[in-house]
Image (cartoon, rainbow, N blue to C red):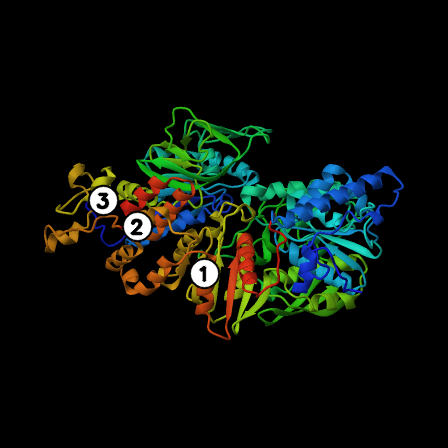
Amino acid sequence: MRKEKSSQPISPEEPEQPLQSDQLHTTESPPSPHTPEKKRSPKNRGNIRAGLAVIAGRSVGALSRRLHLGGGTSIVGVVAQRVYPDIVEHLATELEHGSIMVTGTNGKTTTSSFISAILRDGGLRVWQNREGSNLMRGVASSLIIRARPNGHLRRSGAAISIFEVDEAALPQLVQMIPPRVAVFTNLFRDQLDRYGEVDSVVGHWKRAIQLLPNDTILVLNADDPAIAQLGEAFSGKVLYYGITDFTLAQPEPQDEKRHQVVDTRSCPHCGNEYNYDVRFYSHMGHYHCPNCGDRRPNPTIQATNIQQESFDRYRIQVQIEDKTLPITVPLPGLYNIYNALAAITATHALHIDWEPITSGIEQSKPVFGRGERIQAEGKTMRLLLAKNPTGFNEVLRTLFTEEGSHHILFVLNDNIADGQDISWIWDVDFERMAQQTQTLVVTGTRALDLALRLRYAGIREQDMQIIPPAPLRAQKQRQPVRTRLRRNKKHKLAEIAATPSSTTATQHLYGLKNALDQALQQTPEGETLFIVPTYTGLLEVHHELEQRGLTPHYWEGRDA
Amino acid sequence: MAQDYTQSLQLTLGHLYPDQLNLYGDRGNILTLRRRCQLRGIELRVVGLGVGDALAPDEYDMLFIGGGQDKEQAPVAQDLHTMKGIGLWAAIEDDMPVLAVCGGYQLLAHYYRPADGPDMRGLGVFDAWTEHKGAHVARCIGDIAIRWNNMTLVGFENHGGRTYLGTAKPLGIVLKGNGNNAEDRTEGAIYRNTFGTYLHGSLLPKNPHFADYLIELALQRKYGQGSPVGNIVALNGTGTHHTSSSNHATNIYVDTSERAAGSTPAVALRPLLSPLDDSLEWETHASMLERLGLYSEATTVLQKHTS
């Protein structure tokens, strides 16, 4: 049975199905961990402590949600681990089918969601931690909220857990919960202020892999040299996946206007630069080292033929060993084909049949902000999270490959969960979108920085509406808005004088709410507004849409 | 040997190690220099200088070095010595403007001493050195504002190493943030026209005055033959034939007068670096200052530049 009544909001069993509002009510009410009848005499001290830890954690979590102190997800794990440090190991051993871990820079959430849909269709009971709760404490919470006060997991039979794991948290987590399958999607520069450099992430991962038992199966992206190299030191089984359809190749970046961020360019063995026979994006492709001969491993599972049927439908041929099977990926972008391949490979490793694989992937709905579609007033909104330069470049490529122009809303924030350094916007190929926007609204805490970047990409100031979070104090003090506008009109530069109206609008509006209103207003009925936010921007947009009754309540993940 | 510079002013920017040292949006700096030149009719050619390429100082008017990952910095440090050291030194001693950000800045000082492992030798342009004190010492990460030439520069810093200045002059004094070492409030270093700094973000887009300063230094060096920058920029032309040997400070500007002198004498010449509409730049600059709590500096900036 797929449909279960979950009393736990942290990881709904059906993430692709929006929670109903009546369900929400029950989820918001605290679980009753103090029910006395459940307190049976435990067999050993471990269970007593585990039980206590579960009670303590869940009580605090419920309290924290009650008091609106936060999502109340991570605190559950923190408190429970304080009471019983081995709580996670204790509970993890009870999962009948063990666990799968998914890590990497981009695609963790979508890959996990594909895997869970497949496994569910394969008849398993699937537990997931929520994205944003992918550090140690979040993973702990996801187990604890499933545990009973007697220290055992509820319904652990036929259960498998999928953990989406933060890159840096992996070494610690694999020690506590040795996974059956570990999936590595890709590695790009991301939040340099938080993770440090790309190489230090490779270091974390190599340490984690050394800690894995031999019967773990590694699932690695063959097309990403930083990921593929992880298989070399592992003595257990390794499955690679990759793309072999060369029609998708990008020409080598000859033209300096087409900018590609390449994060892994040299061979880890000899330091020589890789040569590429074909490059899909960034450093993803078919590479070899001309010096020592290191090359892309031959993938066990590969996409041999990819046909784009529409914006968010790809028909691909998947070759598994000697069979070739068709499948449709119902999400936009080449990067989602990689996510689908990762999920296919991971579930293939668990001997899941092709049938649930097809149905799981083909019936997937986009998860939170990853291509998610929302309808309002006869208009469609598509949310396309973009949190690092490669992710952003791929979103832009997906949007601006073909002719035709779009309505766009960018939200650039620099909160802790986004990474406070926004230098990376200069590495994004915004040049691609010049002359292809019908309307463009720029907002977020760093709206001005992004507007500046866009101007350098050849988008004129009058073609975008800049809506910062708040007026500058200095501007408010200095002159009332109207004076400022009159001065602007007198300004020598024709481009400002020519469009006082757009300048007027820009000067008057602040905040995400206004930005969303403007963007929606400018999008005619029947057309689509593409919203491209950073992570906390996505949360804000979702919150705003939720206020308007357009999306389900979603409070998880804010504690990232 | 008077030359007609009117046809096109042309500058060549050597971008050192564009593939290895490009971690923090360094491309923004290049885009800014190019655009600000372009808008004034100056052609800026950008030449990438990778590992193995020699640096012939005569071929360039400006140089830029960005920051990269440790792994990529080591082969670069080696190449900087073996392939480019002499050319770079010659360029620097010949007052070529050089901007070195983050890792590039560290490579131009004496050495970088990691927490473990051998020192990485730098070029020693700046009398300064960098030490990484180990994982227990926090990285210097965050928005930063410094005072430079009585103006502000804003950016983002992210460095594990702490740089200490010997006799090198700092680029500026930290208003908010860490700077070179989070101890002495210095930020960056200057030697002749070579500027080292930890500010990225990118640095130049929202610090247009600093971008123009670098362009002016380059133009002056190439066309102005040693005259102070201010004279080139501020002057309206009355001159006729200025040759390359001319050194009268008040009369020197880039000579577009070859043509002008023949037809209409004393024609008012366009100042070399005409002002641009930088209101978005300064608004972004001011918003950074406000984010750091520097409200009076933000007001000053807006008063000066956007009214």
Kind of element beneath mark 2: strand
Evaluate whether residue B150 shows in this view: yes
Identify which residue, B108 or A135, lies in the foreground. A135
The answer to whether mark 2 and mark 3 are in CB contact below 8 A is no
Kind of element beneath mark 1: helix
Q: Nearer the viewer, mark 3 or mark 1?
A: 1
- The residue under label 2 is B10
State which chain disc 1 sits on. Answer: A
Evaluate whether residue A208 shows in this view: no
Identify which residue, A2 or A50, lies in the foreground. A50
- The residue under label 1 is A515
> Badge 2, how many Cα within 10 Å: few under 14, some, many 20+?
some
Q: Nearer the viewer, mark 1 or mark 2?
A: 1
State which chain disc 3 sits on. Answer: B
Identify which residue, B190 or B258, lies in the foreground. B190
The answer to whether mark 3 and mark 1 are in CB contact below 8 A is no
> Badge 3, how many Cα within 10 Å: few under 14, some, many 20+?
some
Identify which residue, B289 or A516, lies in the foreground. A516
Which tag, 2 or 3, sits closer to the chain's start? 2
Where in the figure is residue A288, as x and y percent of width and height? 63, 51
Give the CA distance from mark 3 to mark 1.
Answer: 41 Å
Where in the figure is residue A232, as x and y percent of width and height? 72, 46
Which quadrant, please, contains the N terminus of chain A? bottom right
**Are labels 1 and 2 on one chain?**
no
**Amino acid type at image mark 3:** Val
- The residue under label 3 is B233
**Amino acid type at image mark 2:** Gln
The answer to whether mark 1 and mark 2 are in CB contact below 8 A is no
